[in-house]
Amino acid sequence: MATDSPQPSDEYSWSLPPSDQSECPLFSTIPGELRDIIFDYALSEYEDTSRPYNEQTCYRRPDYHAPRRIDTDLLRTCQAIHREAWFRPWTNAEHVFFLTSGERRPPRVTETTQLQPVLDKIERLHGPLETSHIRVFAQLYLLEPGENLQRILGMRHFYPRCVTLTLRHTDWWNWEYDEGLRIAARWVDYCRLPRTVTEFRMELETLERKKPQAEEIAKKMVEGWQFTRTDGVQLCADAKEVSSIQPIEWSGKSTWLGQRWIRDENRPEELDYIVKTIVWRPNPSAISKAKQAEQTEDMQDGPVDEGEETPDDSDAESVELKRRAPDLQAEPRFGRGIGGLRVLKVDDLKGAEVPPGTSGQEASEKIREWKEKQRQAGQAGQQDSARNRVWAVRGQMMGRLRRLTGQDGDGTNNG
């Protein structure tokens, strides 16, 4: 996530001495509780629509049409406001991370190496400061080992209350070949949520026609998966709550990375998606047990806050032995195809001059006709080229013959 929020500094430099603002109604009349509401509203983030994301990408989606930013002009108005609200851009923002390959994320994203120094400074200036929400978009090949997600969750002085993990349609294994949804569970047992987390959410996005698969995976997650905080508290999912959450439905472009996925189109150049949400919350009895355990001994299982080392590759065997969460797989329900063709290349669509809004079947036919014309034109060109070469060789041979017989260009004998 890219915002224009200020970087905390160890000391503030002001040209004038601070004022108590006793004559300002904002401080002399309005209670602090109302000022909090005002500051939260003024320092909330929004999409910068002047810099929209390309529609033909994997990362443009609902609520993510453009980079997000926070206007911080309010903090520059006076020292009193700055002292009282300098940290709110941090707490109000949704911090977004991408565990994906480079082409599947925006050009500018948050990295833990950039964020850790900020967290350290906030801790020094303010003390522990909770953030409302973080979101992680993850491809399964980067999520399932667990180490990559743990680098985010295990940052020092990182205290989120809600963590959302989103799997997009293109993040599932072998989505290109229309395989059934599946996910390995090593990361579930490996990762430890910060002790401040009161809600962990997973969003399972897939094509609308694969909705039964997403629901099957979600049901198995509710039954078999639990998450653990650094203080030992277990987070569980409630089947009734999950079933009451209506799936999100949205439509997006079928073209990205230079290919149009006609196999999955519901309408020309559009795909319909569904997003199934599962929520895990702390088990009340586990909270009380964890508090008792903290008084007697330190937690032994998994990384904790304040920079405790996370498991590394050398711990893989021990992690496997402790596994409880099962790997999950849904029965495949293969969708329709168009003559076995999955995609059309954007370069071919441009070459064939296929108009926007053309159906996949018509577009593929136009490309086929265009390629046939290209082939025929290529063959004709090869024939013309061969014919020209023959005439060139013939001309060379005739020239040599004339020189040998002593004839000039008009056929007379100069001997």
Image (cartoon, rainbow, N blue to C red):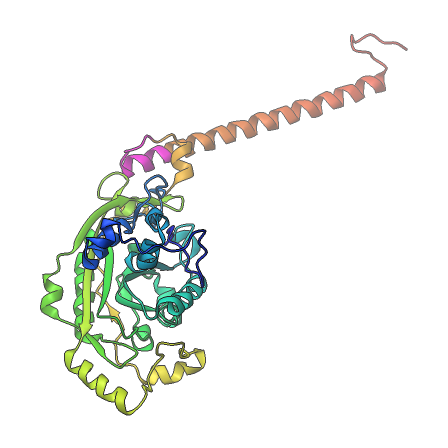
Q: Quadrant of the N terminus?
A: bottom left
Q: Main secondary structure of the magenta part?
A: helix
Q: Is residue 268 visible?
A: yes
Instruction: Say left or right for 269 vs 150.
Output: left
Looking at the picture, how far across and down is residue 297, in whole percent? 30, 91
Looking at the picture, how far across and down is residue 322, in whole percent? 31, 84
Q: Quadrant of residue 161?
A: bottom left
Q: Nearer the viewer, residue 83 or 333?
A: 83
The residue lying at 60 percent from left, 27 percent from top is 385
The residue lying at 65 percent from left, 27 percent from top is 389
Looking at the picture, how far across and down is residue 264, in whole percent? 26, 48
Instruction: Say left or right for 285 vs 187.
Output: left
Looking at the picture, how far across and down is residue 338, in whole percent? 27, 44
Q: Which residues are magenta?
A: 355-368
Q: Quadrant of the C terminus?
A: top right
Q: Nearer the viewer, residue 339 or 57?
A: 57
Q: Is residue 294 above or below residue 357?
A: below
Q: Nearer the viewer, residue 81 or 386?
A: 81
Considering every residue shown, the one lying at the far right of the view is 415
Q: Is residue 22 above or below residue 268?
A: below
Whether 359 is among the magenta residues is yes
Whether 357 is among the magenta residues is yes
